[in-house]
Image (cartoon, rainbow, N blue to C red):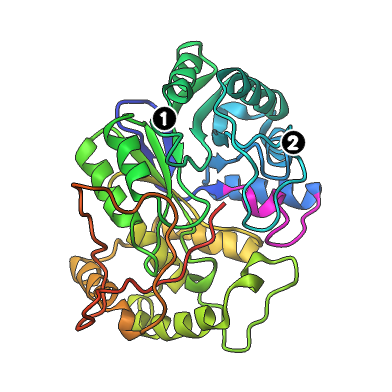
């Protein structure tokens, strides 16, 4: 496993991290506490030191799993988490991709961080991000001043924002980088859904101070290379709600990416991580992990050879033509257009007079 250090800090993270969403939220299967802790311990054995939580994952369960797994070895791991969704007042409000209400109240944010610290059994959390910041949250001084105050008090070491739950939020991300000077930005990005994640990653590179965490690294499992035209998802699996066209079109796109892994001693799932890690500001990748075999495959990606400049060029060309697949316009969330700043998606169909962006919305957390 290789490691990277956040700009201007001593926070060093593993290139492959472990997001506890899959273990605690119940959207990727059901795990007992013992099963979840065993998977976390195996991840640490493989060199993964970065574990990403969110206080709303299982309404606090993810935090408790971290305490069980690493309470006696807290100094050996980096914990990142997210607060902002008020699940204390709305414990049953979340249904599928529907969000529960946020709170931007400073008193609430302090309470949420304190509760997370107690559940995790620690005095300090390494990075806290405001969970899925929307248009009204980014200009709200109270949020970021509260997080900065908590940093100065020693309860957190760095702060930032997460974008989601679906793909989009371009200008929210740009403002977090350029105006809020966030130390961390968690975003959605992968080979099949590179907009606006790639543009935000490039903005972080230009800033010289923002580190990036990437989630939905495998396009909700498509880039794991395990799906077939006959794949069916369990009733409690959020991918079951995707249109069938997402599956069929995705399989066609994977055919165009065979050059990345066949005959190279690398799986498509590992190549997907290496594509993200080609940017020096991607501090850690957070693939969805839900079994030991997958964990071992992803953890091994860090030490594999980097993708070549020719690989990256070929991928960019495929993205520009949407891998030769014509499909519906993507449904973005958040602020994607702003007067005076006409940022257009760089990934388009060749010859399409509308320049339609082609990927369906990614399911984030």
Q: How far across and down, in percent of the image, does residue 357 sit?
A: 33, 71
**Does 25 lie within the magenta span?**
yes
Which SS does the magenta portion mostly show?
loop
- The answer, for residue 304, to whether it is visible in the render is no
Relative side of 116 to 130, left or right: right
Horizontal side, residue 36 vs residue 311: left or right? right
The numbered mark at residue 11 is: 1
Within 10 Å of disc 1 (Cα), the crowding (few <14, some 14-19, many 20+) is some
Residue 188 falls within the magenta-colored stretch: no
Residue nearest the viewer, comparing 151 with 161 = 161
Q: Could you tell me how far apart the alpha carbons at marks 2 and 1 are, in whole angstroms?
A: 23 Å
Q: Secondary structure at mark 1?
A: loop
Q: Position of residue 134 (x, y in %)?
A: 46, 42
Q: Where is 310 relative to 79, above or below?
A: below
Which residue is outermost to the top? 153
Looking at the image, which residue is at 29% across and 61% down? 306
In the foreground, 1 or 173: 173
Q: What residue is drawn where x is 25% and y is 45%? A: 203
> Which comes sooner in the sequence, label 2 or label 1?
1
The label shown at residue 68 is 2
Q: Nearer the viewer, residue 209 or 182?
A: 182
Quarter of the figure with residue 231: bottom right
Residue at 41 percent across and 69 percent down: it is: 330
Q: Residue placed at 30% from the left, 32% from the top? A: 7
User: Residue 303's x, y, as percent?
Assistant: 39, 56
Residue 154 image point, x, y percent? 51, 14
Residue 294 visible, this orientation: yes
Q: Magenta region: which residues?
A: 19-32
Q: Which of the 4 image quadrants contains residue 233?
A: bottom right
Look at the numbered disc 2 and give the secondary structure of its residue: helix
Sort mark 2 into few (<14), some (14-19) or many (20+) by Cα contacts within 10 Å. Answer: some
């Amino acid at each position: 496993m290789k490691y990277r250090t956040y700009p201007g800090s001593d926070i060093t993270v593993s290139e492959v991290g472990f997001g506890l969403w899959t273990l605690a939220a119940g959207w990727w299967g059901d795990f007992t506490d013992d099963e979840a802790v065993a998977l976390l311990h195996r991840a640490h054995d493989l060199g993964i030191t970065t574990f990403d939580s969110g206080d709303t994952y299982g309404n606090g369960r993810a935090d408790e799993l971290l305490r069980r797994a690493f309470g006696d070895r807290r100094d050996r791991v980096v914990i990142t988490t997210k607060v902002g969704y008020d699940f204390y007042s709305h414990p049953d409000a979340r249904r599928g991709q529907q969000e529960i209400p946020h709170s931007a109240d400073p008193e609430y944010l302090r309470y949420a961080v304190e509760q997370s610290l107690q559940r995790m059994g620690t005095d300090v959390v390494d990075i806290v991000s405001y969970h899925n910041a929307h248009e009204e949250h980014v200009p709200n001084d109270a949020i970021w001043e509260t997080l900065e105050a908590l940093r100065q008090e020693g309860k957190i070491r760095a702060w930032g924002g997460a974008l989601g739950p679906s793909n989009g939020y371009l200008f929210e991300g740009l403002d977090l980088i350029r105006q809020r000077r966030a130390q961390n930005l968690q975003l959605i990005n992968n080979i099949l859904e590179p907009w606006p994640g790639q543009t935000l990653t490039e903005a972080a590179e230009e800033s010289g101070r923002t580190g990036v965490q990437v989630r939905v690294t495998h396009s909700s499992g498509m880039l794991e290379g395990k799906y077939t035209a006959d794949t069916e998802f369990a009733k409690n699996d959020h991918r079951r709600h995707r249109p069938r066209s997402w599956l069929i079109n995705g399989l066609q796109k994977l055919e165009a990416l065979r050059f990345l892994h066949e005959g190279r001693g690398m799986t498509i799932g590992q190549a997907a991580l290496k594509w993200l890690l080609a940017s020096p500001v991607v501090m850690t990748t957070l693939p969805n992990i839900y079994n030991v075999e997958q964990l071992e495959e992803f953890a091994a990606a860090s030490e594999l050879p980097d993708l070549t400049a020719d690989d990256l060029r070929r991928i960019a060309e495929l993205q520009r033509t949407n891998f030769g697949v014509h499909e519906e316009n993507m449904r973005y969330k958040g602020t994607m257009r702003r007067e005076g700043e006409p940022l257009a998606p760089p990934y388009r169909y060749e010859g399409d007079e509308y320049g339609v962006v082609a990927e369906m919305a990614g399911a984030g957390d």
